[in-house]
Structure formats: C-alpha cells, structure tokens
Amino acid sequence: MLDTETTRFVDAATALPAAALEAAFESQLDLLGEGGNEASDAAGPSASANSELDHRIRAALLPRADELDEHRIGLHSDARTAISTAARAIVTRRRLTPEQFTVLVTPFVELDLDIPAHAG
C-alpha cells in the first residue's frame, strides 16, 4: 500500500492543468543529464508499489487523455512518465540520496506542488 504522502502527490499531480504537466515533463527532460537518469534507476520501488502507482496514475489520467493530447500530441503519455518518475522518488525517498531525490521531484517543486521532505 502506498503511503499518504505518495497518494497525495499523485492525486495533486494528475489534477494539474495540461500546460503544467507539459512544463513538468520538459523540466524532467532537462534534468536527465544532471543525474536524472541515474537517480531514476535508483528509485525503483517494489513490484507491488510500482503496480499500485501505475494503476493510480493511469486511472487518473485516462479520462483526461483527449484533453492532454489536444494540448500537445503525446502529452498524455509524457504526463504519466513525469508523474511516475517523481512518485517513484517519493515512494523510495528513504533509499535515495538527497541529490537523487531532488533531481527527480524538482519538476513538480517548480510547480509549487507539496512534496514530502527527503527522509534519508
């Protein structure tokens, strides 16, 4: 079962406007070269947590697929990726270094979303 902080983040992130989700994804791409790839690899949650995250994110974004893709083709998929990456960091925050955690959640910090503190 996902912790409260993670479910709160997913619920808030999936409700963001299309433009904000596009900005989060673009920011995430920019951070890949700044340790984002390595951090993402380190943030692998358990299979059950990953499955629960995937289901929660998909269930929230699927009804918005047309809206997101009308804003920018492929945004539905990109939004899932951006939210999933940050949510995986939140789930595994106790294992990540502060730098790894920061690089993965920064796109949503920039949008003023409530992100739990790193707990390493």
Image: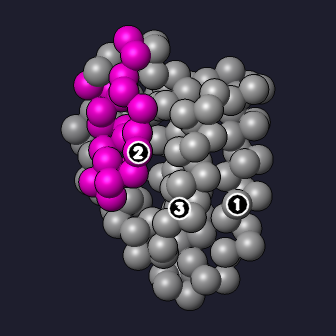
- Rendered image: mark on residue 114: 2
Q: Earlier in the sequence, mark 2 or mark 3?
A: 3
User: Residue at the spot x=58%, y=59% of the render?
Assistant: 14
Residue marked by disc 3: 79
- Label 1 to label 2, Cα distance in Å? 18 Å
Mark 1 secondary-structure assignment: helix
Q: Position of residue 97 (x, y in %)?
A: 33, 17
Q: Earlier in the sequence, mark 1 or mark 2?
A: 1
Q: Earlier in the sequence, mark 3 or mark 1?
A: 1
Residue 50 in sight here: yes
Q: Magenta span covers which residues?
A: 99-120
Q: Position of residue 72 (x, y in %)?
A: 48, 82
- Label 3 to label 1, Cα distance in Å? 11 Å
Residue marked by disc 1: 60
Q: Position of residue 119 (x, y in %)?
A: 40, 16
Q: Find residue 100 and report its image quarter.
A: top left
